[in-house]
Amino acid sequence: MASQETKRGADRPGETTAAHVIDRRQFLQYTGTVLGGVTLASAAQAARAASHDLASTSGRGGNGSVATARPLVRVAADPSRIPPPITRRRPAVVPVTLEAREVMAEIEPGVRFRFMTYNGQIPGPFIRVREGDTIDLTFRNPRTNTEAHNVDFHAAMGPGGGALATWTEPGEEAHLRFRASYPGAFIYHCAVSNMDMHISSGMFGLILVEPKKGLPRVDREFYLGQHEIYTNKPAGLPGEHDFDVGAMVREEPSYVVINGAARGLTPKRYGAMHVRTGSTARVYFVVGGPNLSSSFHPIGNVWHELWPEGSVINAPLRFIQTYAVPPGSTTVATLRFPVAGDVKLVDHALTRVVHQGCLAVIHAEGAHDPTLFQAGGRRQL
């Protein structure tokens, strides 16, 4: 299958606690960043924001009263759910079904937002084809939706990348066929008249067109997408948040997230990604935007090979610490894991990590190698 759906899981908030308090050292350990010049006020604010992931909380109404917990849709795509590498050596017709789904979900515990998605996940389904394949797309806009939707493929050579051909009102279905005539990792996204709002609300994904000779072998593959969310309430304030068009025009997001959730791919939320020491992993990274670039960086590691703009046909860059990925583009990069522990994937515009939730974690399990890294402990001076 070239596309797939993430299971529509549900958050199950636990009991509310009176307060969640973490000190500055705990907070810095949690985010994996060491920042100088942080005021007490800003550190406290950051700690309160991070505390949503350090303890489970129940849903709260807009007036602060405790509300009855109710299951909500999870929109954060499982980063490990990727179709396997293509082994065939002949072109094929690949059926793909995308469905626009408008769903209420949590950005972070207690903060609800009306997302727009492909197949109920952010980023949309990872589509994997081979150079020369023909994509046979069915695009559906269910009657229960409130907006027109479509899809623009940067991998498609044709008017609007298919945007006009797939434009649908609620209750309509459209069909499109196009040939994947050039290799690479490309974004696809909604492209209706208010496309910036739709992309910010989650309507983007990645299509990989493998070159005819395939890609180098790796042990694991992960799929991540970054975008910013503009809401009419401050980040972390419990309750239902509406979309704020003015904040989007000013490019002042409430959240900058990976896979549609603030600190979603971390041990305290939906879980970290997992590898073994000595293994390799390839990361497919797409930036929906709609406005902000990502300074993509692995804390405690480097990108051992990196293909800018997802151009996998070219020779990779090597040992890259941080790489800028603009909105509407991708990068493909590999990591090696010689040291056990957490590798934190962040946007190195670090305010987005500390205050806006842009954090994902890969945990490497295995034996420690003190010749590479050994913490010496601490003592009082």
Image (spheres, rainbow, N blue to C red):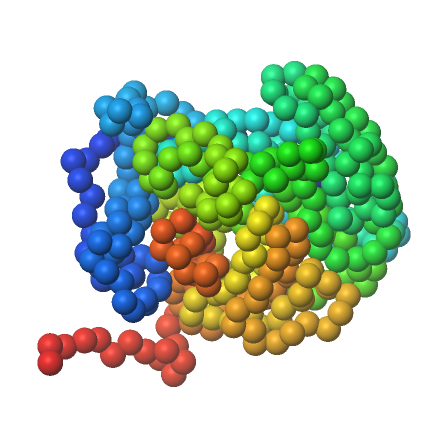
- Tell me where residue 354 appears, x and y as whole percent: 36, 55
**Relative to 367, is 54 on the left or the right?**
left
Residue 306 higher or lower than 178, as above or below: below
Query: Can see residue 122?
Result: no
Residue 192 higher or lower than 25, as above or below: above
The residue that appears at 17% across and 40% down in the rendered structure is 19
The residue that appears at 24% across and 31% down in the rendered structure is 15
Examine the image and state in which quarter residue 351 appears: bottom left
Examine the image and state in which quarter residue 313 appears: bottom right
- Tell me where residue 106 appears, x and y as whole percent: 42, 34
**Relative to 296, is 237 on the left or the right?**
left
Q: Quadrant of the N terminus?
A: top right
Q: Quadrant of the C terminus?
A: bottom left
The residue that appears at 85% across and 41% down in the rendered structure is 159
The residue that appears at 74% across and 25% down in the rendered structure is 168
**Relative to 253, is 63 on the left or the right?**
left
In the image, farthest residue toward the bottom: 371
Query: Can see residue 159?
Result: yes
In the image, farthest residue toward the left: 380
- Tell me where residue 167 appears, x and y as whole percent: 76, 29
- Tell me where residue 91 appears, x and y as whole percent: 88, 49
Examine the image and state in which quarter residue 282 appears: bottom right
